[in-house]
């Protein structure tokens, strides 16, 4: 009930935020802005840009020049433009634009948004709770608007329901909280499958899971795919005997050793395959029972073709950390001549479903149609052929709030269930204890680089279970940790702990 009420209040806030703009365009002088984001330009990009400008002119007497930039070369050029003091208008940050939120904020690339949001971006402000906005603050100022999308680690088991029904495997009543819980289900499925279908006995029962986090451990991580300096999450003590404030080397814990031993054993016993190279077709046969998924909020009936039906069971814990908000979003250039109008544009982009949909799918009647029931469809449109679409930018995180976008049921399921679940799962996420903390590696840059090399040497074989025995796993994990120590892991942990303690004390 609380989640439903939260969602309704959010929708109401966004509606109220848009209403004052209606009818005010004639009171505003005309403004034109550039907007750079990380998407590939499509054949009808210019045509859609014109339609968007018609809409924005009507609403807030503003036009935007959409720059569909993709590729490292473009974003290297953007850094040069920023350094030269150019007005780049509205600009994306995160993985798709290759512009780091923290470093670009600190070097003065982005305009501080605190006051702008108060006056022109109340709809944006309503998208996230205060804890998230506090996390976006760099030295007291908010410089970017995170994209409202799947803002947490939504880990799930995607499973072959046709097999589950045939063999009497009750997926829904299994507990799912990490690497330990999947083993019992997988062993039951293999035993029953191999007895019923001996022709499939050589197939693995699970598809490859080659990442330690977030598939196997729920932890707060500060160094992307490095796990030698992590913290426990509130209420999810994956590392026993450690609180949420203590920085810990995951690799040097009993839990990691247990995980590595388990993975080797599961490969040895045929639960996982040793190598999945050039084995993609295995997924479509009906012989595989499960896939561990990340980010799914809706599962289509035949994800892997017509041979079997798929369902999804979410893991019991969902959580989020700083990276989920820094990895995709929108900022305003610090040199923007009209930052107030840029904020008005972004407020509409994040609260107006028609504009959000147009940015992704183009113009109704050309790039998408309505069927007899009034539902959105690509049938009969210039986007009908997936290999030759005229304008199509799904999921497009750099374009703002995804949860208000209208999309065909082929993308979001019946009645947009994917996006509705996305909102619910976001609201269910446990927030990391240090949301907004960013580790400054300046004092340990040499050690961080050396430790990355050590991880590259050992991490993959352990995560893939490709060692020969439990004894070898124990030997390699010990060797791994010896090399981490020799290359300064304790110094990095001490530096991170000091920064974390200082950050906590200052809040």
Image: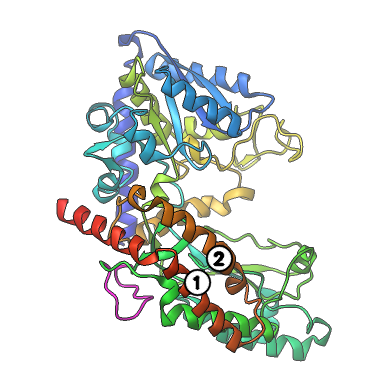
Q: Is residue 297 visible?
A: no
Indicate yes or no whether the magenta region holds residue 234: yes
Asked if 188 appears above or below 436 in the picture, the reply is below
Asked if 420 appears above or below 246 in the picture, the reply is above
- Residue at 51%, 31% in the rendered image: 37
The label number, if any, that marks residue 368 in the structure image:
none
Q: Are marks 1 and 2 in contact (CB under 8 Å)?
A: yes
Q: Is residue 189 visible?
A: yes
Secondary element at image label 2: loop
Secondary element at image label 1: loop
| Side of 126 relative to 507 (left or right) | right
The label number, if any, that marks residue 211 in the structure image:
2
The spot of residue 204 in percent (x, y) is: 72, 78
- Residue at 48%, 31% in the rendered image: 354
Report crowding for label 1: few under 14, some 14 to 19, many 20 or more residues within 10 A (C-alpha). Answer: many
Residue to which mark 1 is pinned: 216
Which of disc 2 and disc 1 is earlier in sequence? 2
Give the Cα separation between the discs numbered 1 and 2: 8 Å
| Side of 140 relative to 171 (left or right) | left
The spot of residue 152 in percent (x, y) is: 42, 57
Asked if 424 appears above or below 350 in the picture, the reply is below
Quadrant of res 388:
top right
97 or 298, nearer to the observer? 97
| Span of residues in magenta | 233-244
Asked if 65 appears above or below 323 in the picture, the reply is above
| Side of 347 relative to 419 (left or right) | left
């Amino acid at each position: 009930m609380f989640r439903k009420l939260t969602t309704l209040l959010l929708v109401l806030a966004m509606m109220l935020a848009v209403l004052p703009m209606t009818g005010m365009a004639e009171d505003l002088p005309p403004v034109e802005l550039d907007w750079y984001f990380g998407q590939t330009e499509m054949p009808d990009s210019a045509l859609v840009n014109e339609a968007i400008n018609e809409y924005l002119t009507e609403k807030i007497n503003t036009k935007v020049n959409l720059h569909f930039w993709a590729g490292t070369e473009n974003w290297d050029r953007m850094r040069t433009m920023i350094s030269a003091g150019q007005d780049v208008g509205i600009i994306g940050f995160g993985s798709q634009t290759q512009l780091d939120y923290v470093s670009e904020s600190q070097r003065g690339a982005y305009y501080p948004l605190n006051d702008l949001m108060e006056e022109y971006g109340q709809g944006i402000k309503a998208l996230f709770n205060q804890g998230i906005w506090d996390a976006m603050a760099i030295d007291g100022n908010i410089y970017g608007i995170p994209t409202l999308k799947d803002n947490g680690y939504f880990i799930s088991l995607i499973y072959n329901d046709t097999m589950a029904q045939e063999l009497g495997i009750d997926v829904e009543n299994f507990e799912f909280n990490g690497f330990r819980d999947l083993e019992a289900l997988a062993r039951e499925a293999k035993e029953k499958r191999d007895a019923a279908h001996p022709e499939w006995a050589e197939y693995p029962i699970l598809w490859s899971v080659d990442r330690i986090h977030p598939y196997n451990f729920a932890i707060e991580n500060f160094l992307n795919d490095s796990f030698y300096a992590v913290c426990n999450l509130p209420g999810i003590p994956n590392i026993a005997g450690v609180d949420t404030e203590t920085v810990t080397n995951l690799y040097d814990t009993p839990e990691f050793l247990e995980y590595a031993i388990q993975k080797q054993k599961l490969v040895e016993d045929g639960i996982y395959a040793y190598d999945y190279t050039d084995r993609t077709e295995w997924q479509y046969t009906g012989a595989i029972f499960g896939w561990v998924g990340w980010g799914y909020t809706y599962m289509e009936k035949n994800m892997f073709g017509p041979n079997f039906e798929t369902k999804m069971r979410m893991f019991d814990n969902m959580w989020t950390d700083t990276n989920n908000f820094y990895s995709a979003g929108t900022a305003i250039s610090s040199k923007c001549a009209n930052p107030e109008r840029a904020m008005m544009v972004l407020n509409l982009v994040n609260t107006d479903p028609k504009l959000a949909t147009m940015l992704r799918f183009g113009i109704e009647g050309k790039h998408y149609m309505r069927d007899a029931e009034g539902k959105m469809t690509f049938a009969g449109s210039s986007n009908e052929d997936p290999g030759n679409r005229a304008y199509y930018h799904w999921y497009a995180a750099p374009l703002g709030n995804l949860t208000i976008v209208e999309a065909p049921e082929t993308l979001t399921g019946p009645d947009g269930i994917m996006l509705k679940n996305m909102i619910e799962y976001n609201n269910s996420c446990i927030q990391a204890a240090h949301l907004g903390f960013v580790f400054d590696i300046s004092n340990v840059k040499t050690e961080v680089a050396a430790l990355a090399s050590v991880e590259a040497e050992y991490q993959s074989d352990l995560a893939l279970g490709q060692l020969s025995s439990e004894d070898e796993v124990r030997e390699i994990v010990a060797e791994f940790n010896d090399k981490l120590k020799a290359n300064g892991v304790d110094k990095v942990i001490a530096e991170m702990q000091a920064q974390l303690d200082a950050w906590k004390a200052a809040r």
